[in-house]
Amino acid sequence: MRKSIFIVMTMLTLLACGSKKAQAVSEKTEAKESAAVEAKEKITGLIKELYAAAAQNADDIDQRFACHEWRQTVGAVKEKDSKIEDIGFFNEDYWTDMQDSNPNDLEARDIKFEQLDVEKGTALVDFILHSSVQTVHMKFCFCREDGDWRVHNIMKYYNDPDNKEVLTNYLESMHDYLNEEQEDVTELTFSNMAGIYDSLDEKMNSESRFCLMEDGTATWNMIGSLNITEYTYTIKGNTICLKAKGVDSEEDCYEYDADTRSLKNEQGAVYYRQIED
């Protein structure tokens, strides 16, 4: 009888311990879920607040919404851009993809959380930036800094020449731009000028392309087109002059800028040297 009572008491004790552990696990899970819901609400509110400010063309968005690394990197890029005469890294508002003033109907729609780790303080959010001017597919990387959620990186989708959606990473691209070594060209030759040079549209997508060869020949074509024009070219100091093969036409001459790695003619057409993989 005593043995039976002992067994029953032991089982009741184990059940009680198991119940407490299960309750503790349940409470911990509920706390995590509650923290995730709260974080999503704060981040969603921050995105909407950011674009409400952008719609009013506020000039302090970086200070209010971006992390320290983002602001420092942007500052370094702007400093580098200030030393070149032509278009630098920034050719649009990176928050809105607008080149002119922002419309007043900017709105972040279809906000989706692709990743959220409240303990580590990181999140990845996908959304559509809608306005009466254009629609942009974007992603924000968030970090928790000084207790607040802040934008750590901006990523945008663009259509490539084949109309395929390509994701551009702003922070990574800025670091690559800052790490580029300035090309030191004291004398232009067929050898050091051989390469690919692209003209860019307003969204920094390649439109047309010159390919300069080491043998003094060149080709030109619109991106995605199979029609190719063949040239020969000569080098006169800092100037590249191209003449179409088999056509009685004047030379088209371009000045080479080593700082921007670009070719520019008198009509203002600019071709930027591409980094080959």
Image (cartoon, helix red, strand yellow):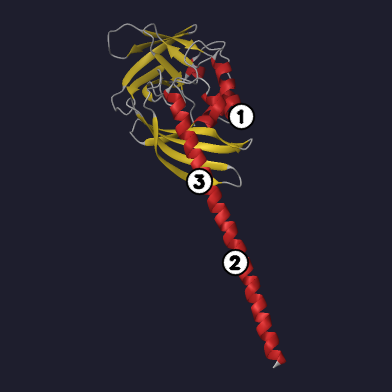
Q: Where is residue 101 in the image (x, y as percent from the top left)?
A: 40, 18
Q: In this view, does 34 lie above or below 155?
A: below
Under circle 1, the secondary element is helix
Q: Which of marks 3 and 2 is nearer the N terminus?
A: 2
Q: Earlier in the sequence, mark 1 or mark 3?
A: 1
Amino acid found under the numbered disc labelled 3: Gln
**Residue 165 figure quarter:** top left
Q: In which quarter of the image is residue 181?
A: top right
Compared with 39, 68 (above or below) is: above
Quarter of image, res 104 = top left
Q: How far apart are marks 2 and 1 (CA)?
A: 42 Å
On the image, the x and y values in percent for residue 90 come to 48, 20
- Residue type at the position of mark 1: His
Q: Residues within 10 Å of mark 3 (few under 14, many from 20)?
A: few
Residue 221 vertical placement versus 140 (above, below): above
- Left or right, 169 with respect to 162, comes to right
Q: Where is residue 268 in the image (x, y as percent from the top left)?
A: 39, 9
Q: Which of marks 3 and 2 is in front?
A: 2
Give the residue number, with chain letter if any, for mark 1. 68
Mark number for residue 115?
3
Does residue 214 appear in the picture of this structure? no
**Residue at 50%, 46% in the rendered image:** 115
- Label 2 sits on a secondary structure element that is helix
Q: Which of marks 2 and 1 is in front?
A: 2
Q: Give the position of the N terminus as an image quadrant.
A: bottom right
| Residue with the most extreme bottom position | 1
Label drawn at residue 22? 2
